[in-house]
Image (cartoon, rainbow, N blue to C red):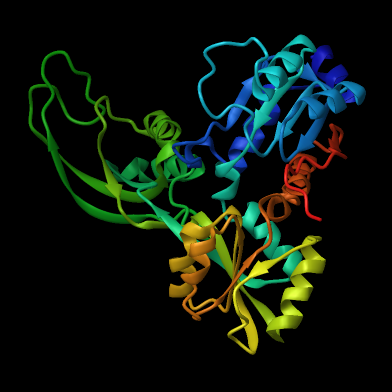
Amino acid sequence: SKVKILCLIFGLIKIGEITNHLEQIAPLHYQESYDNSGLITGNKEHKVKQALITLDCTEEIVEEAIAKKCELIIAHHPIVFKGLKKLNGKNYVERTIIKAIQNNIAIYAIHTNLDNVHNGVSKKICDKLGLANCQVLSPKSDLLRKLIVFCPSSHAAKVRSAICNAGAGQIGDYDHCTFNSIGKGTFRGNQNTNPFIGKRLEIHQETEIKVEAVFPSHLQGTILAAMYQEHPYEEVAYDIIPLHNKHQNIGSGMIGTLDKPMKSDAFLKFVKKQIQTDCIRHTKTVKKEVQKIAVCGGSGSFLLANAKQMQADVFITADFKYHEFFDAENDLIIADIGHYESEQFTKELIQDILKENFPKFATHLSELNTNPINYL
């Protein structure tokens, strides 16, 4: 349409198109229960020309968006974590929301869902440190299900392709992963049926293929719709089974290796330079050389046991409390680089995700340092 062509020429895009793309990379289903990722203010149908990308959303960030004529703010941290019962400007959260709404600026947050994907926040830190062979440090369970569907052999290929194209059968770097077995299905339709094979009121026996495929639970609706679209039966026989398998590409933190070992002190200085931080709080350099490095953007002390289990030499994260440093037990080096410092490159990550799909959409990285912590 002419409207769509003009939108492409002038870089106007619906907010919903942008958020849908972000959620394909980091589905909201993967955020933690306490989180509030997603569209916080704004209308998905509104068209925007520019977005401001930031780690935090504050009153100053909204002012920056106004100055740069950005109609959308994409933040890593949600400005609203808890329910708001009043909006009268009594704190910075309410004032930020009010200012955004008054200036017709939408706010979107992509937080722990971006933390929990393989190419997310922690992977960005790995890239800055040049780590290779990276994998999720603590993969999540109970995110996978198995679909088992029975269909006549004549339509098995169509049904199989449909569910796989909708997102089933993805295991690591492999797709269209299914298991197929042949058996005999029996059925009888009553007088109200119109069977694809056989006759009503008669028991029919048919050679069928049982197709099995694993899928992420948040895609269940899409996959079932695709299955129904291609399946010829009036009543489709299928099972959905919850799996306790760990999703190897979804979870907290990352672990990888340096190309070659480095001396502990030299590595910590390297981290300080690469992460652009003024301060690293760390435990004793109990290892002369280090090579296996665990990382977690933001508050990652809960992953210390995982880092130990994976035999990391160093665990880089933020927000360790005093007594938690003792828990290193000389098994590894804890390096606390600061919360803001560990996530500051998330802005680049979000911008890269958007540029890949919307090359003509204008994105600006915030020039403000929103770190509330200062060092002397």
Q: Residue at x 24, y 27 (%)?
A: 235
Q: Residue 18: x, y in percent?
A: 70, 30
Left or right placement of residue 195 versus residue 279 in this view: left
Q: Residue 232: x, y in percent?
A: 33, 30
Left or right placement of residue 189 versus residue 221 in this view: left
Quadrant of res 241: top left
Quadrant of res 130: bottom right
Quadrant of res 73: top right
**Quadrant into which the N terminus falls:** top right
Q: How many labels does the image show?
A: 0
Left or right placement of residue 152 versus residue 96 in this view: left
Residue 283 vs 11, above or below: the answer is below
Q: Residue 134: x, y in percent?
A: 60, 68
Can residue 174 be spotted in the picture?
Answer: no
Q: Residue 105: x, y in percent?
A: 76, 18
In front here: 285 or 211? 285
Can residue 181 be spotted in the picture?
Answer: yes
Residue 288 vs 37, above or below: the answer is below
Q: Residue at x 34, y 57 (%)?
A: 245
Left or right placement of residue 48 versus residue 280 in this view: right
Residue 136 vs 140, above or below: the answer is below
In front here: 11 or 286? 286
In front here: 189 or 102? 102
**Quadrant into which the C terminus falls:** bottom right
Residue 44 vs 155, above or below: the answer is above
In this view, the residue farthest toward the front is 376
